């Protein structure tokens, strides 16, 4: 019994009198680490900083960040000058290791026109990435050769690369095409028997009143039987072409071969004119066509030069022979040309008579290329067919199509004349 009382007493004293209480251990950070979202930026761009201590606590908002030894407000900064800058952070008496931020100054070159005709000029401008105008202080290089000033007038057609420099900083590259005047081809599938076809004739007149850069080919269709209601004395066998474009009625007018001229054509003149100019400025294409011809008795010699800037990519050439001043009655269901049901002895122009090439185009061969000028030359000798009424009224149309059949550019010339590149 005496031993039991001693044990209980000892247990109570031992459990109740201890002063060894567990308390949380609070660690003190001994270092901080500064990081940046981007170590290299363009002038005018903002960098964002972050600060952690060695215990992985984020202390960005409590730290002070020094950019080039100058304390900044907050944890983001937009430098106003370019260069290499040391950045550090301070927090609770701790100083981070410095990091380097590189601020690049860039310049941007712009050009007022990227496509021009030979003889036209372009104006160049330069600004830095803060928008400061450096045009008058920059240097300009065309294909690596320095020019004087910030205007440039090419001396030949082709593609050229333009760059600018300022204080040893190079700009972006800008490409300039000095090319050929864009012309638009209208293939009018028509007939003297077709009462609605004068609508397209009127639309063509409206186009020609607005631009000199449209070329019309009237492809007459119908029967060759003079007793037929659909007889057309100027009929040209173009069924394969009609199948190709998916023709389903007359009149049908195609723009640059594969684009349907919207109905009613007289209300969509801009669909044609907008292809050759924009706000009064001629559109420019990288394909040009030149036509020269001579007529001796009934033999027509044609030379077509086709210039294709950039790499050759399956282009083909189509050549048409047209006749003007052909008179024949025209059925008319429209209000145009006086509104008569029959336009007596109506003059038909641009009538397709012969096609020296395949109607879908002849490919350009390597032996037809002048490697110095980059121009393809095709020559044709044609015996004119007996259906041509007056050889003094003949014209030639030549056009280049791409691998998909779209017309890239076209040219028109009277027989016996030369129509140069434009």
Image: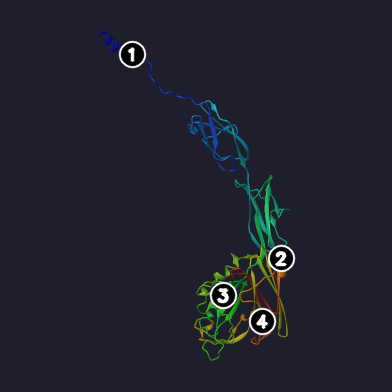
Q: Secondary structure at mark 1?
A: helix
The answer to whether residue 137 is seen in the rendering is no
Q: Earlier in the sequence, mark 3 or mark 4?
A: 3
Point out which mark residue 374 bears.
2
Q: Earlier in the sequence, mark 3 or mark 1?
A: 1
Task: Tell me where residue 8 appears, x and y as whole percent.
Answer: 28, 12
Find the distance from the CA under tag 3 to the CA under tag 4. Answer: 23 Å
Q: Residue at x 56, y 30 (%)?
A: 96
Q: Secondary structure at mark 4?
A: strand
Question: Which residue does the numbered mark 3 point to in the structure image?
Answer: 206
Question: Which residue does the numbered mark 4 point to in the structure image?
Answer: 394
Q: Residues within 10 Å of mark 3 (few under 14, many from 20)?
A: some
Find the distance from the CA under tag 3 to the CA under tag 1. Answer: 116 Å
Find the distance from the CA under tag 2 to the CA under tag 3. Answer: 37 Å
Question: Which residue does the numbered mark 1 point to in the structure image?
Answer: 14
Q: Earlier in the sequence, mark 2 or mark 1?
A: 1
- Front disc: 2 or 3: 2
Q: Earlier in the sequence, mark 4 or mark 2?
A: 2
Q: Earlier in the sequence, mark 1 or mark 4?
A: 1
- Front disc: 2 or 1: 1
Taking 115 as reference, is 261 above or below it?
below
Q: Secondary structure at mark 2?
A: loop
């Amino acid at each position: 019994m005496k031993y039991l009382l001693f044990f209980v007493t000892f247990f109570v004293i031992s459990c109740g009198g201890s002063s060894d209480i567990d308390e949380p251990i609070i660690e003190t950070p001994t270092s901080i680490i500064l990081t940046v979202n981007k170590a290299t930026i363009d002038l005018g761009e903002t960098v964002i900083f972050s600060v952690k201590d060695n215990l992985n606590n984020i202390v960005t908002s409590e730290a002070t960040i020094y950019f080039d030894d100058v304390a900044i407000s907050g944890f983001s900064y937009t430098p106003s000058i370019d260069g290499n800058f040391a950045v550090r952070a301070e927090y609770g008496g701790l100083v981070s290791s410095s990091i380097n931020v590189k601020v690049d100054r860039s310049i941007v070159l712009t050009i007022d026109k990227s496509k021009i005709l030979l003889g036209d000029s372009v104006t160049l401008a330069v600004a830095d990435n803060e928008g400061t105008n450096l045009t008058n202080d920059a240097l300009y290089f065309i294909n690596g050769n320095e020019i004087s000033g910030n205007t440039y007038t090419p001396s030949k057609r082709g593609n050229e690369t333009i760059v600018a420099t300022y204080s040893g900083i190079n700009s972006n590259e800008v490409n300039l095409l000095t090319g050929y005047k864009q012309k638009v081809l209208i293939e009018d599938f028509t007939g003297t028997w077709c009462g609605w076809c004068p609508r397209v004739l009127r639309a063509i007149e409206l186009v020609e009143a607005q631009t000199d850069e449209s070329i019309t080919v009237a492809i007459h269709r119908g029967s060759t039987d003079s007793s037929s209601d659909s007889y057309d004395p100027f009929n040209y066998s173009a069924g394969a072409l009609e199948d190709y474009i998916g023709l389903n009625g007359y009149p049908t007018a195609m723009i640059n071969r594969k684009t349907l001229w919207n109905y009613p054509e007289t209300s969509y003149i801009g669909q044609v004119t907008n292809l050759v100019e924009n706000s009064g400025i001629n559109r420019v294409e990288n394909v040009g066509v030149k036509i020269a011809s001579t007529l001796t008795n009934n033999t027509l010699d044609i030379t077509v030069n086709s210039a294709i800037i950039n790499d050759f990519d399956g282009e083909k050439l189509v050549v048409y022979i047209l006749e003007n001043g052909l008179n024949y009655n025209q059925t008319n269901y429209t209000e145009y040309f006086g509104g008569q049901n029959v336009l007596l002895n109506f003059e038909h122009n641009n009538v397709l008579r012969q096609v020296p090439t395949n109607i879908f185009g002849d490919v350009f061969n390597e032996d037809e290329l002048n490697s110095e000028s980059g121009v393809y030359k095709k020559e044709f000798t044609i015996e004119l067919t007996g259906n041509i009424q007056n050889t003094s009224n003949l014209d030639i149309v030549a056009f280049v199509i791409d691998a998909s059949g779209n017309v890239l550019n076209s040219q028109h010339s009277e027989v016996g004349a030369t129509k140069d590149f434009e």
